[in-house]
Image (cartoon, rainbow, N blue to C red):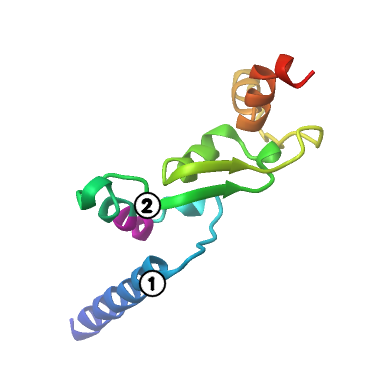
Amino acid sequence: REIKALRQEIRSREEKVVQELISEAQVVLATNVGAANRILDRISKKDGPMGRGGGAGFDLVVIDEAAQALEASCWIPILRGKRLVLAGDHCQLPPTIKSNIKAVQKGLGKTLFERIMEMYQEDSK
């Protein structure tokens, strides 16, 4: 029982320290999926419009290798920021989808970068 309480206290203290570090940091790095961390949820809620929560917690989100990041995974960090930069080369190899289901391969194989390039293809000519 005492060990369980001590473990809980350790987790609580560690989470508080990490939250303070992230709150004070000028730059925070994470993978797309790692941006779903619950500590980042608290920061995003705290930094909402007029301090009421629910807002974007970061001024800028940069997704590197965006041409290889699946669109679904990109939305996790995108929703945490006010502005977005997608960095990557759309002529690179596409993401690897390990599935035998054609519908999954077709739907998940598109990146946000690729979708944007298709939308503005005429503008780039």
Report if residue 5 lies within the magenta region. no
- Tell me, yes or no, if residue 74 can be seen here: yes
The one nearer the camera, 9 or 42, is: 42
- Eyeballing the image, is 65 above or below 101? below
For residue 35, the mark is: none
Few, some or many residues within 10 Å of mark 1 (<14, 14–19, 20+) = few
Circle 2 sits on which residue? 57
Name the residue type under label 1: Val
Q: Is residue 53 shown to the viewer in this render?
A: no
Q: Which mark is residue 18?
A: 1
Q: Is residue 119 above or below residue 78?
A: above
Residue range highlighted in magenta: 38-43
Which residue is pictured at 54% across the width and 60% down the height? 29
Front: mark 2 or 1:
2
Residue 1 lies in quadrant:
bottom left
Q: Locate residue 86 relative to residue 24 in the image: left or right.
A: right
